[in-house]
Amino acid sequence: MTMSHSPDVACTRCRFFDDHGVKSAGREGLCRYNPPVSQPSPEAHGLWPVVSREDWCGHFTPDTAVAALGD
């Protein structure tokens, strides 16, 4: 099975992409689709995966797209 990628399918177009409100500074954000990965010690915080705006995954569908882009 081959997966094709288009610019319309990218993390930056997904409702689960979190750029912390910074539109122009940086090409990375956090993927909020799954819960954060836990750390080995109880007092450590979990970490969300860091993704590039151009990354994409198999979870993206038109239903998960953001309503409107502010870019």
Image (tube, grey):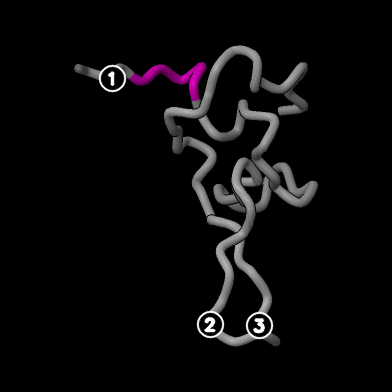
In depth, the one of 18 and 61 nearer the eye is: 61
Callout 3 environment at 10 Å: few (<14), some (14 to 19), or many (20+)? few
Evaluate if marks 1 and 2 touch, with contact meaning CB atoms under 8 Å apart.
no
Instruction: Give, as a single range, the part of the protein colored magenta.
Output: 5-9
The spot of residue 26 in percent (x, y) is 60, 52
Which residue occupies 64% across, 69% down?
A: 46
Does the magenta run of residues contain 53?
no
Is label 1 or label 2 in front? 2
Q: Which disc is residue 40 wearing?
A: 2
For the view shown, which residue lies furthest in the top direction? Answer: 62
Secondary structure mostly seen in magenta is: loop
Asked whether residue 6 is drawn in magenta, I would say yes
Instruction: Report the Cα–Cα distance between label 1 and label 3.
Output: 37 Å
Name which of mark 1 and mark 2 comes first in the sequence. Answer: 1
- SS type, badge 2: loop
According to the image, label 1 marks what residue?
Answer: 3
Residue in front for this viewpoint, 43 or 7 = 43
Q: Residue at x 49, y 21 (%)?
A: 9
Residue position marked by numbered label 3 in the rendering: 44
Residue type pointed to by label 2: Pro
Q: The N terminus appears in which quarter of the rendering? A: top left
User: Do the residues bearing badges 3 and 2 touch, measured as CB atoms within 8 Å?
Assistant: yes
